[in-house]
Amino acid sequence: MKSNRRGAGRREILLAGCAVLTTACGGGGGTGASDPASAANAATDSTALAVAAARDITADILANRDVTLAGAAIVKLPAGTTTYTGVISGGGTLRLTPAAATGTLVITRTSTFTLPPAQQVQVVTKTVYPGAGYALTLTGSNPPVLTIDAGVTFQIGTNTAADSSPNVLATSDSKNDASLINGEVNLNNIRNDGLIVLSSAQFVLLGQISGSGSIVQLPGVWGGNSPRGVSSFTGVLSLTTGHDFGSNHVAASFPNARAILNEGSWLVWSPPGSVVTVPQNIYEAAYGNDVNFHAIGPSTIVMAGVYSHTDNSPHNTPNLVNPGLSDPALNYAKVIYRGGANDVNGNDGSYRGINIERGAGTVQWGDGTHANFFLPSAPSPADPNPPLGKKNAYINLRGGNLAFNYNGAVTLHVGITGGGGGPHRDGSVGTGNVTIMATPGNDVTFAQPQNYNGTTTIGANAVLRLGTGTPVPLNYITVNATKGKSTVLQATYSGDASLLTAESPNGAASNAIVNDGQLIVQNTTTDITLSNISGGGKLVHSGAAALTLQNNSHRGGTQLRGGATWAGSANAMGTGDVANDAALALASGQRELTLGGSFRQGATGQLTLSIAGTAPGVDHDHLGIAGAAVLGGSLVLNFSGSYAKGQKLVLIQAAGGLSGAFSAVTAHGAAVATGQDATSFFVIVQ
């Protein structure tokens, strides 16, 4: 009997500790039971014992008395709302549990109680990055100082003048000096199995949040809030005005959250030296919201989910169970709501905005494991007010790098720019770099003209397509609560795309393309110019629209499969092999085309050369080929001026040897006979 009593007493203490310190003890259910029922029963027993062991401070809270903790405490909240204007200090833990089924506690001031020193394990370290500032890194995780049981709503603030920086806050403890933390980390962590409501007129700094509950910001709350560190909660984060996900010095992470509902401005930060990954989908219900990225110094923000419209969570009425989108087509159209719960979403329900702000880091869309594009949208030109109809997305690139990392085909229907909407709608040119990452299968199509100055990089194994090759509709979809959905075709876009180059009216001399994969031009109606292409990748022209190339050094070869390709400089085709199965000509005023590899013209290819004199490469067009040349298809010669009979004009010279023959030669302005030898092709005026 004596031995049994001692064993029971020890178990009571340990289970009480686990119930309060749920992070350290595996969430309160780590009993070693092999079946779910046993585990659930053990967790229930654990909670009951913790409640029994804790000091009950309910009466103090209801009387608005200040409380000093000296160990575990509990508040048994009555039904309805309890507003507490006192302060809880001292050392210990606090549990909020409903006396009945539900209860709400509203705090209006800063409570400063902390874990007892023996339970403090979290350590903050500082790393300085020259030129980029510093980062605070959190090692270890304190068990929760506050536990919110199911059925409890914990509201931080009233969003009135009565608020005095409400929070449960600790910015120093036995392991971390206040001067190091500098007010940037809250060491008080929370287990939330109920609901946290943010309603403070002042900024709320959150510690790490665990549990199964959600976090909701009430409408019209502009005090600001920010989590820091790894929060493992599995609920939903719902925002209405603004939220800083981390800061320029401290990273945040929500690895298990179900979704993020953004009805305001969500600011995502990556401090120097960090990789911040957001695996969730982000949903928006109505016009006027955006996601803002701040990648500081050598850091990366990875958005692994989708930034989507939602028709299942009306504006300012968050669905914390199943936020989402019933019809993916709504992401690709302007959406108008009439009647029903979604009527508040208005006339531009699917409108979403991206602002990539100045910083040296990288914002990466996709994690390389899927092909669900981050920003599915309707055709959305760079112009803030497109003449063909309303767009439903914008991307303002205002510094740093935007990278795409998928393992399949995705399409960007947005023109990246600097002032395309939201807080930046002045039509200005974007600044920054865009990368198609070197993931096998990463195949990205740009379906709109791009309006950014910087370097576009295509990684090995990756593909960038300019133009869809097919028309893209701009649809307006009306969702009527009683009549259902109706679709109107507002306009049709060509799907053509372009990049700003040094030659563009708004281009910068430093603009460049680094192609180590494939660059495929598929425009059907819009002629474009591409220049300053380097790298070991291949360039393919397959669209019907004309392409002008100039000042390139890419080594992977050039394939001409459609439309007309104009050589605007001697090195237009880079240094690799060239295969012409479409139409090739030299641009006006350009007389020499130098090919660093071989040249092959197929049966469907056409080469057009202009002749205005007798000096090759000076006043008549000339091809100088370092490798072998294989002729085929047709040759068109356009003469201007007069020529003596018998004049010989060498048009093609191939150091690696010349073979094959043109199937047809058409000369305008002079009669000629053709001839060729082992290394050259020439004509003789008749």
Image (tube, rainbow, N blue to C red):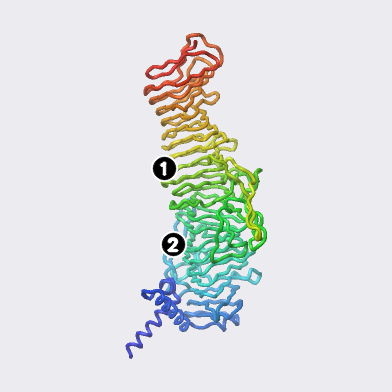
- Horizontal and vertical percent for residue 207? 50, 67
Q: In the image shown, does 2 or 560 lie closer to the viewer? A: 560
Residue 306 numbered mark, or none: none
Q: Is residue 580 left or right of residue 7?
A: right
Helix, strand or loop at label 2? It is strand
Q: Which residue is mark 1?
A: 460
Can residue 59 be seen here?
yes
Q: In the image shown, does 117 or 421 lie closer to the viewer? A: 421
Q: Which residue is mark 2?
A: 125
Which residue: 37% across, 24% down?
A: 656
Q: Residue furthest bottom?
A: 1
Q: In the image shown, does 82 or 343 lie closer to the viewer? A: 343
496 over 56 or under it: above or below? above
671 over 68 or under it: above or below? above
Helix, strand or loop at label 1? It is loop
Label 2 sits on what residue type? Thr
188 over 472 or under it: above or below? below
Q: Nearer the viewer, mark 2 or mark 1?
A: 1
Q: Residue furthest front?
A: 483
Q: Quadrant of the N terminus?
A: bottom left
Which residue: 62% across, 61% down?
A: 315
- Horizontal and vertical percent for residue 35? 38, 74
- Horizontal and vertical percent for residue 676? 41, 17
Can residue 422 be seen here?
no
Dot placed on the residue nearer the N-terminal end, 2 or 1: 2
For marks 2 and 1, give the CA distance: 38 Å
Q: In the image shown, does 126 or 439 lie closer to the viewer? A: 439
Label 1 sits on what residue type? Ala
